[in-house]
Image: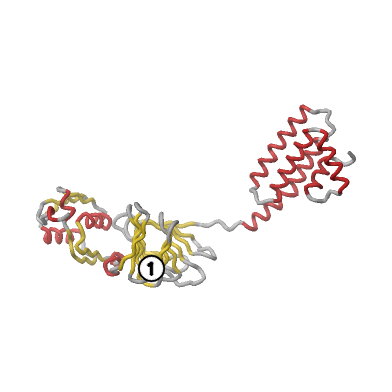
Amino acid sequence: MEQNPEQLIIRSLAGEATKEEQQVLQTWLAQHAEHQELFDSYSEIWKQRTGNNEFQSLSKSLEVLNHKIDTHQKEQRANTITWPKIAASIVLLIATTVPTYLFITTLNEPAAIVWKERSTPAAQKLTLQLPDGSVAKLNANSSIRFPKTFNPDLREVFCTGEVFFDVVKDSLHPFVVHTHEVTTRVLGTSFNVKESDATIVVTVASGKVSVENANEKQIIHPKEKIVYHKANDEFLTHSANLELDLAWKDNILIFSDTPLNEVAATLESWFGVTISFADARIGNCSLTGKYRNEPLEKILTAISFSTGIRYTRAANNITLSGTGCNPTSKP
C-alpha cells in the first residue's frame, strides 16, 4: 500500500478518493479486523466533525480512539499500520477542526443574559421600571425576575405572587410574563397577574391579553379576568371588577362580603402580622368595607364593630374571638 492508510481513510471520508484508491482501501480493510476498527473510529470522528454535535462529544470520541491506539500499539507492535503517524493525523485533524468549530460557535453564541431580581416581603410593595420603560408594581410577598436588557425579539419576565404590569406598546416585540403553569403574552396593555397555591388569575385593565399553558390558549379583553385552577388544569373566564381586583396597586383595601379567612390572609400580607381564630368558624364570617391607606388597628376596629368579633393583639400576633357574627349560619 503506497499511501498511509490514514491518508486513504481521510480522503475517502472527504469524498476525494479516486476509484483506484477506493479499491486499495477496500482491499486493506478486508485484511484485518483492526483495519476495519480503525476506519470505523475515523468515520465516527468525521461524522461529529461535520455534524451538529457538541465539541464535548468529539473530545470523548478522541479519548476512546486514543485508548484504542494505545491498546493496539501494545498488542500489535509489528503491525504494518504506522500508529504514530495515525496519531499525528488525529492531532492535525483536531488542530484544523477545533479552532474553526470554536470560532463558529463563538459567532453564533448569544451574549450571556444578565438577570435582575426584585422581591417584596410582607407589608411592603414596590414599583419599578423595566428595561423597555414598562412599569411593574409588586404587591407584598411577590417577586419578579427580568433581564438587564431585553433581547431583540422578546420582552420576557418571570414573577411570583401578585404583579400589576403597565406595558409599553411595541408590536414587534411581545411582552411575556411567566408564572409556574401559565404564560401571559401582550403587545401593549395593562394587566394584573396574581398567583396563589391554588390559582393563577390574570385580570386585564386595557388592551388584549393571551393566556396559555401547555394544553390551552385563551384571549381575554378589558374588564375580564381568567382564573387558572391548578388542581384540575382548567381555565375559567369571568367579568372583572377592576376597582375591586386592582385596588391594591393604589394602596386601597376593598372587601365585598369577603370571608374573614380571606380577609385575614390579606391583612397578614399587607401588614406583616399573624392572625388566628379562637374558633375556626369565625373564618366563615364576612366583611364589607373600603380602606385607603388605613392603619391595621382601624381595620381591626371596623371588623369588630361590623361583626361583633373581638380582637386581641400581642406584638404582631392577633387573635379574633367571639361568635357575634353567628358563624354557624354561614356554610
Left or right of 286: which side holds 169?
right
Q: Does the rendering let one see residue 119?
A: no
- The relative height of residue 37 versus residue 140 in the rendered view (above or below) is above
Q: Residue at x 77, y 38 (%)?
A: 87
- x and y, in percent, of residue 210 in the image: 42, 66
- x and y, in percent, of residue 303 in the image: 15, 59
- The relative height of residue 80 versus residue 251 in the rendered view (above or below) is above
- x and y, in percent, of residue 124 in the image: 31, 58
As rendered, which of 302 and 271 lies closer to the eye? 302
User: Mark 1, residues whose alpha carbon is within 10 Å: few (<14), some, or many (≥20)?
Assistant: some
As rendered, which of 235 and 111 lies closer to the eye? 235
Residue kind at label 1, given as amino acid type = Ile
Q: Which residue is mark 1?
A: 220
Left or right of 48: which side holds 223?
left
Q: Residue at x 73, y 30 (%)?
A: 71
Q: Does the rendering let one see residue 73?
A: yes
